Image (tube, helix red, strand yellow):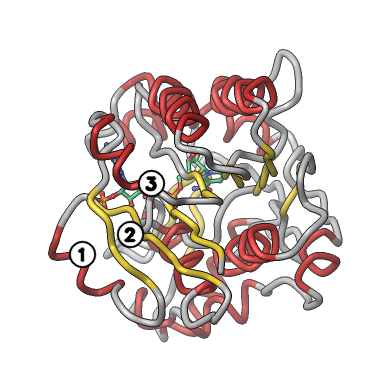
Amino acid sequence: MTTVLVTGATGTIGSQVVAALKGREDVKVRAAVRSAAKADALRGGGVVPVDFEFTKPELIKKALTGVEKVFLVVPFTAEQVEHATKFIDLAKEAGVRHVVKLSALGCEYVPGIDLGRWHRIVERYLEGSGLAHTFLRPTNFMENFIHFNPPGKDGNIYLPFGQAGCSFIAGADIAAVAAAALTTPGHEGQAYDLVGPEALTVAQVAEQIASVAGRPVKYVDVPEEAARQGMVGAGMPGWSADAMLQLYGLIKAGHAARVTDTVQKITGRAPTTFAEFAKKHAASWK
Ligand SMILES: NC(=O)c1ccc[n+]([C@@H]2O[C@H](COP(=O)([O-])OP(=O)(O)OC[C@H]3O[C@@H](n4cnc5c(N)ncnc54)[C@H](OP(=O)(O)O)[C@@H]3O)[C@@H](O)[C@H]2O)c1
């Protein structure tokens, strides 16, 4: 029996990793949560919620007691590197054997972009820690079209991607790879580039959302400055909007259209298409 701590267990990827591990006889899952209300929804099938807060070392130590493996998601905040490195120190102290870290595609490129650099600093820290580690480096999540860039009331998706394609990936596929890395041998020291099965433009994504939502949805390609104003206007801090724009610039330049067979190789099944994802999540856009 392996005890696995999943951080960010109420978030997009962590919640799907918990679901992927739930009900397995060989795994006990500790789902790290900040609120009791959200904890109850996760309970059952070998999943036990545990109080967790990256700013509270005492809570982290308690959550890590008896844990052998960790799925590490660190939320996208100004303190992300500090939170991650402190967590790694505490995981080492607690006797954790293996950390599977959610990173980002291309984070190893130099000079790269801020988002990638922050992930790579943490990856390097893990490499130097002596802990066994696996890096999952996904591209843009399909879920972003639900949580961050859904079609508005006007039916428009505003993004500065130009006409470039991106091989968006479903969170469930990242979670399936995470579950394999946490429960089967041979993943220590590996870094996996995780992408979906096809590169789609946002216009093509909009068409697919329209077909399941039963209403017109259109992509509007916006200039960078308008995208920045939109993000900051929606409450995003300037540093974070700037980091997103660097990423969007790479996508617009065509650097996110690559397709790999990594998900298929590790999980034994083809990655989710956007059409399948859209069908499953149609209610989110109605
Ligand atoms: N979005 C993308 O396309 C994309 C692509 C590649 C890589 N990534 C990487 O994915 C990661 C984000 O994953 P995600 O989208 O699954 O995250 P998410 O949905 O934003 O969820 C964040 C999770 O962290 C928890 N959390 C927030 N602040 C916390 C704190 N102070 N202490 C403890 N827990 C805290 C949240 O809990 P509450 O529910 O209580 O708020 C939630 O469970 C980032 O590292 C990002 O760079 C994202």
Identify the secondary structure beneath mark 2. loop
Across and down, in percent, residue 173 comes to: 64, 67
Tell me if label 2 and label 3 are in contact, CB under 8 Å. no
Residue at position x 43%, y 82% in the image: 282
* Three-letter amino acid code of the residue under disc 3: Thr
Across and down, in percent, residue 249 comes to: 62, 30
Tag 2 residue: 10
Residue at position x 58%, y 64% in the image: 175
Whether label 2 lies within 8 Å of ligand 1 gets the answer yes
Q: Residues within 10 Å of mark 2 (few under 14, many from 20)?
A: many
Identify the secondary structure beneath mark 3. loop
Tag 3 residue: 65
On the question of residue 225 being in view, the answer is no
Tell me if label 1 and label 2 are in contact, CB under 8 Å. yes
Identify the secondary structure beneath mark 1. helix
Tag 1 residue: 38
**Front: mark 1 or 3:** 3
Quadrant that contains the N terminus: bottom right
Residue 183 is drawn in which quadrant?
bottom right
Q: Return the residue nearer the eye: 49 or 277.
A: 49
